């Protein structure tokens, strides 16, 4: 009630004649003027509720320091995407044949075609079988040519790749025939790293700070990314990919936490959107480099070399003053704020700086168990985990569906990445106009529409004529690819809104831990997608996408809006108890009050 009386008192203090002229000039005088006033008052009361926002205003809302901080997220975002998607370009399709060099002992002058014709059986369609060979016999060459060979067996001496133009993991570690399933094992291992890394780095970021967590993740990118180029077995490759995935998720969690706590208002949204745009740029950069390099090891050498300059972040990256304050490190928090103000050429008033005090409660008591004890946090984390599980499962299902259609790996990354940049830039308009809650709902609704359309389109190259036998197969395939690309467009926007929304809903003391929990749900959704799409009919994965998207869309309405609302630092401050001015509408304020 006191907050509402203050609002009315400020409204009464407006100059009556000035308000009258504004009312006469507007097409809808009463609602338009009040909406403008209430929006301004919401922003003012947000800053009053969040004392730290006042400090950041004094430091400079978006000065040189904040712009430099946002720019520092660009290169790590590019490298995170580079190493995350590099695993898709090292499995270049190869056509193997059994190594039958034994016949060269009796016919050293045989050409490659003659060798294959004598030692490799053919299938019913006349093509050479890739996983079978004729067993060696103690005959001379004339007898082999005259009588031929009959006894077949699996390849005994490895494989050869006569048509290979690039060196990939497939022809280096012979991931063919019975070992072909190891390609999916690599993707599952990467997702398992994200699953475990999300928990580890979530706890590290909240316990040790944003700064050491970012440095640790960047160090992991350099070591594991560069080191992948020197592995000598497929199992060692899996281990290094496991380390890379933990570094990628660790950087995502810690960098979003740092940007959220240093920036205010729409600047926070713009920073996260730009960071995600550069993530898509990293995917496009990777595609170009992978296309031009002839060896998979060179890809990781180039990536590791590009990541080495990130070592300089040891000297230029700041810590979050919010986290320092909540951990009781008031002196360090003041020093960080004063340094930021000096970079922005500002001076913090001494009375504002004195407001940086120790928290009332020991925040070291905060733990992951508080997500179960605190009812509001439990609801937020469950809903967001459901949304992130849905987004991850749907994204990987659509990506694998595009692979089934025979789309090249380069197209599958370049075109969607270009679409993702535009999708994320569109989020700027959505977030400004309708806020976080409705932006998430709109992007999820778009995802539902595209998934429903996919139910009526062919599943793969073999099903192009099954559903619509009268339609040209090429036209159906193009339509399916278009819908899949638009689905990834909507999911990219959903991810960007989701990251911003989740970071604003969580308290500073458990922000990174909460992000880690939703990343865990993401990895679970990806692993489930990889498992289901390989073991079930292709209709079921898309049907599950529709069901999950509808459930996530419905649950998203349970969350509170966070636009123009202060961040809350401790567990005591529930987002539902925030500024009551938000709930006021022009109808709640009479013309007499104006």
Image (cartoon, rainbow, N blue to C red):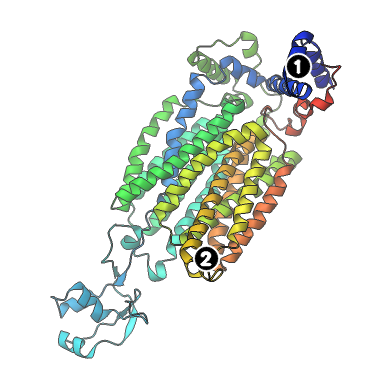
Q: Position of residue 134 (x, y in %)?
A: 29, 82
**Could you tell me which quadrant the N terminus lies in?**
top right
Residue 308 seen in the figure: yes
How many numbered circles does the render carry?
Answer: 2
- From the viewer's perspective, tell me whether residue 369 is left or right of residue 191: right
Could you tell me which residue is drawn at 41 percent across and 66 percent down? Answer: 180
Q: CA distance from mark 2 to mark 1?
A: 66 Å
Can residue 49 be seen in this snapshot?
no
- The residue identified by callout 2 is 534
**SS assignment at label 1:** helix
The residue depicted at 86 percent of the width and 16 percent of the height is: 592
Please state which of residues 168 and 548 is positioned toward the viewer in this rendering.
548
Q: Residue at x 63, y 60 (%)?
A: 544
| SS label for mark 2 | helix
Task: Judge depth for marks 2 and 1 and give the one in front.
Answer: 1
| Residue extending furthest toward the left | 109
Q: Judge whether 81 appears above or below 212 on screen.
A: below
Q: Pick the residue in front: 353 or 90.
A: 90
- Where is 348 relative to 525, above or below? above
Residue 75, percent from left and from top: 42, 35
What is the quadrant of residue 528 in the picture? bottom right
For disc 1, the marked residue is 24
Q: Nearer the viewer, residue 492 or 132?
A: 492
Question: In this rendering, is residue 25 above or below 73?
Answer: above
User: Which residue is rendered at x = 50% and y = 43% of the image?
Assistant: 420
Q: Which mark is residue 50?
A: none
Q: Label 2: few (<14), some or many (≥20) within 10 Å? A: few
Quadrant into which the C terminus falls: top right
């Amino acid at each position: 009630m006191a907050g509402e009386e203050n609002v009315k008192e400020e409204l009464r203090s407006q100059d009556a004649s000035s308000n009258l002229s504004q009312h006469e000039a507007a097409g809808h005088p009463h609602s338009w003027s009040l909406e403008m006033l209430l929006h301004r008052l919401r922003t003012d009361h947000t800053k009053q509720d969040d004392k730290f926002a006042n400090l950041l205003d004094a430091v400079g809302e978006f000065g040189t320091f904040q712009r430099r901080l946002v720019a520092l997220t660009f290169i790590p975002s590019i490298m995170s995407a580079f190493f995350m998607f590099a695993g898709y370009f090292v499995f270049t399709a190869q056509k193997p044949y059994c190594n039958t060099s034994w016949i060269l002992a009796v016919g050293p002058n045989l050409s490659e075609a003659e060798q294959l014709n004598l030692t490799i059986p053919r299938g019913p369609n006349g093509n050479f079988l890739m996983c079978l060979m004729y067993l060696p016999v103690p005959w001379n060459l004339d007898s082999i040519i005259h009588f031929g060979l009959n006894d077949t067996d699996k390849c005994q001496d490895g494989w050869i790749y006569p048509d290979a133009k690039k060196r990939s993991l497939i022809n280096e570690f012979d991931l063919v025939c019975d070992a072909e399933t190891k390609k999916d094992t690599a993707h599952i291992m990467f997702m398992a790293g994200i699953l475990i890394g999300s928990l580890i780095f979530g706890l590290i970021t909240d316990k040790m700070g944003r700064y050491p967590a970012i440095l640790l993740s960047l160090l992991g990118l350099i070591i594991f990314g560069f080191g992948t180029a020197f592995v000598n077995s497929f199992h060692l490759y899996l281990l290094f990919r496991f380390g890379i995935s933990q570094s990628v998720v660790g950087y995502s969690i810690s960098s979003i936490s740092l940007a959220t706590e240093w920036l205010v208002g729409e600047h926070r949204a713009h920073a996260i959107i730009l960071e995600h745009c550069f993530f898509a740029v990293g995917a496009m950069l990777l595609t170009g480099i992978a296309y031009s390099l002839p060896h998979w090891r060179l890809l990781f050498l180039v990536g590791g070399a590009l990541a080495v300059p990130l070592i300089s972040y040891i000297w230029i990256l700041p810590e979050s003053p919010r986290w320092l304050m909540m951990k009781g490190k008031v002196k360090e928090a003041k020093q960080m704020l004063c340094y930021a103000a000096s970079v922005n050429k500002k001076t913090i008033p001494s009375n504002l700086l004195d407001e940086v005090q120790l928290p009332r409660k020991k925040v070291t008591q905060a733990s992951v168990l508080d997500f179960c004890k605190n009812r509001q946090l439990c609801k937020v984390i469950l809903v967001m985990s459901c949304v992130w599980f849905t987004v991850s499962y749907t994204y990987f299902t659509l990506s694998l569906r595009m692979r089934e259609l025979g789309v090249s790996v380069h197209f599958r990354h370049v075109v969607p990445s270009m679409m993702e940049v535009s999708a994320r830039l569109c989020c700027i308009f959505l977030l400004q106009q309708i806020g976080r809650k409705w932006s998430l709902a709109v992007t999820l609704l778009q995802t539902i529409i595209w998934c429903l359309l996919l139910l009526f389109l062919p599943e793969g190259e073999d099903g192009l004529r099954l559903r619509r036998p009268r339609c040209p197969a090429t036209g159906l395939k193009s339509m399916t690819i278009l819908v899949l690309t638009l689905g990834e467009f909507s999911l990219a926007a959903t991810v960007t809104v989701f990251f911003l929304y989740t970071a604003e809903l969580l308290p500073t003391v458990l922000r990174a831990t909460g992000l880690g929990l939703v990343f865990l749900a993401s990895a679970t959704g990806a692993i489930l997608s990889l498992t289901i799409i390989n073991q079930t009919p292709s209709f079921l994965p898309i049907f599950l996408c529709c069901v999950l998207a509808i459930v996530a869309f419905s649950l998203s309405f349970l969350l509170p809006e966070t636009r123009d609302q202060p961040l809350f630092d401790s567990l005591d401050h529930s987002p539902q108890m925030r500024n009551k001015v938000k709930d006021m509408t022009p109808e709640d304020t009479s013309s007499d009050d104006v």
